[in-house]
Amino acid sequence: MVGISRRTLLSATLATPMIARTARAQGAVLRIGAPLPLTGGLAPEGLKQKHGYEIWADTVNKQGGIKVGNGMAKVELIYADYESNTARAVQATERMISQDKVSAVLGAYGSGAVKASSSVTERYKVPMLAPNASAKEVYDQGYKFLFGTEASNDALTVPLAKFMQAHLPSLKTMVILSRNDLFPLALGRNMEAAAKQAGIDVASFQSYAVGAMDHASALTEMAAAKPQWVFVTGYTNDLILVRRQMAELKFSAPIITMLTGPSYKEFSDALGPLAEGITAVSWWEASVPYHGIPPFPTAREYNDAYIARYGTAPDYGEASSTACCIALQAAAEKAGSLDPLALRDALASLDVMSFYGRLKFGPSGQIVVQALPLFQLQGGKRVILAPEDIRQGELKILS
Amino acid sequence: MTARLFRGLAWAATLGATAALFFLGDAYALRIGMTLAMFIALASGWNIIGGMAGYPSFATAGFFGLGAYAGALTQLRGVPMPLAWIVAAGVAAIVALAVGWIVLRLRGHYFAIASLAVMMVLRELATNWTMLTGGGMGLNLPVLQLGIIAQARLFFAAQAGLAIIAVIISALVASSGLGFALRCIRQNETAAGMLGLDARRAKSIAFAISAALAGAAGAIYASAISYIDPTDVFDLLNTVQPIIMAMLGGVGTVAGPVIGAALFVVLEQSIWTNFLSVHAALLGALVVALALFLPQGMLGQLHRRKVKP
């Protein structure tokens, strides 16, 4: 049921920003919706996404926009805060398409929210580009309008298992601790499968609840297996806690791998010497060798532009966000149109190089696999161990 | 007489607005309408145990999530959608009866904490019973092959229908012996018991009705959103917001939760749409202001005006 004054109030509030937007939209404008978790548990990640989008939009607009057909189109980002709440992300996505008439939507943060909101873009036939959703399960519904720039978890775990086996011949047993949440759990499962495939025994597979503050019992059980490799998934705060409790329990192993915290500066800042020697895989590093289309042809140039603007170095979160924008830009240039359907077709057949790597989406919509950088924290810095062409150092075995 | 007429007119206008939204609203307006209807059902349901009986339940989100999972799992086993919603309501009611048998022995703050624990246990179950629920990976529901507007109308109609049922049940409860028993319990449970009132039975029924409404709302939500995971459906906000809504409108009354939900959703939506960065603070300040200046809720304020000319 609906209150009497609800409709009037609602249309009034919705109409105000709409008028302002239409007035601004002189000439062609590529309008892109960006639901962001600006408040709530994912707020830090939301800010990374926003920066990744913003730096692209401002740089492109300063150069006159993007080339669409015979003219130039400015780009306009329309933000909403979805409060780290999935239902809100879905609502924001629908609002952007039905009220703001966006041509494309940039995905929410994390696999779960992307999966839920992609049902809206699919229904409205508007492309969605997800910068931070790597679980294969997000792309398993046969959707035609969903694209993701993070390679699937297999691309990460299979080479990782091979690398560790090659560099630690005594590697026989590993343990896995996963956060029980779509992406980290899927990643843990992928690691388990990759380990088994490589002939590594997974002695213990444990998962912890979202928001868990104590890992002692899981860690004690894992320590009993005397593993050579400890593999932990979760987000920055989870991983900091796990590493600290491992130290308290005097539980260590020759290799400790944590995903996805070590890519972030916050992780090494919070852990100090405890961060030393932790290995991780990233979807992007500033040292990757790719050369691609403007406005940021190389990773180095992107890195420098980002530091000049925000004062800190970007990690894969921002880079993947910018990569989504660049894919959209390339699709608009290729299609010569801002029509969502034309953009979708151009995205599906896109194949261009960028600072982030090759932008080509597979049949499920997820980006095709490329070699991902594997690194170790050494002396507070990320030192790349693989792939060979960008290697900066050797794997150091922990005691 | 004029008060009754006014009340009748207000209900008629509300139903008229619902029908108008159904036929004229675009997909986005229907989505907001669906959210509002869902909260009316949740707030009215909470009001039966929390308002009429005075038992501050924090289990709403627990039964909402339970209903979402029950509905999703039955639907995935081939049960037609509307039937799955009914099953979800039934599952929630049965679990509420079983759990209520224990937690309804507690009163006041103790009951509040125990009901919160019920929600957390249910969330842990959904998270860790991976074989059944998919754990943190969540569940995909069948996607309907319907047009945008048709689908928006369908789920709006479902939630609105549930909201109407919730209000009718509230009215029936309020005017029945059960409502009288609940009000006695709120005023003095020990005295009510001494006078021969079966307080346990009345509380249990109220708790089960409240849970059934939350369960059905959760199941419809799950069908509408087509993907659920434990953190989304066992969200503490779904417990807290209906309580705020009932308090804004007027606790213990039939119309209170409806007015409160409408007021809250309109405020929340308009603030959320227009303020990108400060919306949470603004909404919080507004809720605090409303609680300070309208401690009895909107209805309480109206009644006070009438009494003191």
Image (cartoon, coloured by chain):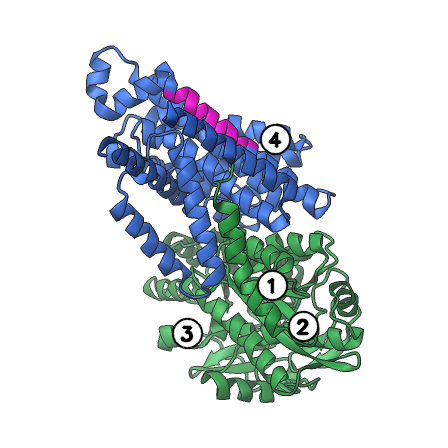
Tags 3 and 4 touching, CB below 8 Å: no
The chain identifier of the residue carrying mark 3 reads: A
**Could you say whether the residue bearing mark 2 is in a helix, strand or loop?**
strand
Q: CA distance from mark 2 to mark 4?
A: 42 Å
Q: Nearer the viewer, residue B175 or A330?
A: B175
**Could you say whether the residue bearing mark 3 is in a helix, strand or loop?**
helix
Q: Name the residue that disc number 2 marks.
A: A30
> In the image, what residue occupies the spot 38% across and 55% down?
B283
Q: Which mark sits nearer the N-terminus, 3 or 1?
A: 1
Q: CA distance from mark 3 to mark 1?
A: 24 Å
Same chain letter for marks 3 and 2: yes
**Which mark is in front, 3 or 4?**
4
Q: CA distance from mark 4 to mark 1?
A: 31 Å
Q: Name the residue that disc number 1 marks.
A: A107
Above or below for A133 versus A55: above
Q: CA distance from mark 3 to mark 2?
A: 35 Å
Q: CA distance from mark 1 to mark 2?
A: 16 Å
Q: Name the residue that disc number 4 marks.
A: B84
Residue B168 inside the magenta-drawn segment: yes
The chain identifier of the residue carrying mark 1 reads: A
Over which residues does the magenta segment extend? B161-174
